[in-house]
Image (cartoon, rainbow, N blue to C red):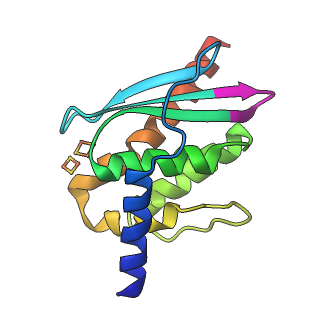
Amino acid sequence: SNLDQLYRQVIMDHYKNPRNRGELEDGALTFNLNNPTCGDRIQVSMQVEDEKIKDAKFEGEGCSISLASASMMTETIKGLPVDEALQISNIFSEMMLGNDYDEGDLDLGDLEALQGVSKFPARIKCATLAWKALEKSVQQKEDEE
Ligand code: FES
Ligand code: FES
């Protein structure tokens, strides 16, 4: 359908022109995560101040879905309070399970372009890799506090 085609274009655009690629330094929260099924790796780094994500970047090697998803993820969460970023992460998990979700007031950005991935179970881990890295980096920070 036209919508599938549009979604495919959005995914390819994020893959070919990744947003926020790179690494933040100086006290950034950083987490590296492997996809055990393929060995690919995504690193997420975030600058968090007053429970707000001031900046976010990603680095790593992976397939088009994993890199496009990481690009969308950083773009979506930048500027958000940490708890809203985690809410969006939960919504994205529901989306990947093929479940209904309610975004309420949250802005999902380009994420809905990845909806179709839920039909390909082997690729769901690709799409969620960057989001899991985000969750782990927040957990790591909480464990340290
Ligand atoms: Fe096969 Fe991601 S593990 S496409
Ligand atoms: Fe490795 Fe998709 S095939 S992250």
Quadrant the N terminus occupies: bottom left
Q: How many marks?
A: 0
Which residue sits at x=63%, y=21%? 142
Q: Identify the main secondary structure in magenta.
A: strand
Whether 53 is among the magenta residues is yes
Identify which residue, 52 or 21, lies in the foreground: 21
Q: Quadrant of the C terminus?
A: top right
Asked if the stretch drawn in magenta spans residue 17, the answer is no
The residue sitting at the front extreme is 17
x, y percentage for residue 91? 54, 57
Judged left or right of residue 60, residue 26 is right
Locate residue 31, reporting x and y percent: 47, 24
Residue at 59%, 52% in the rendered image? 88
- Residue 84 or residue 29, whichever sits in front: 29
Percent position of residue 15, x then y: 38, 52
> In the rendered image of this protein, does residue 91 appear above or below residue 134?
below
Instruction: Look at the image and give the residue range highlighted in magenta.
Output: 47-54
| Residue 107 position within the rendered picture, expressed as x and y whole percent measured from the top left | 67, 61
Residue 51: quarter of image = top right
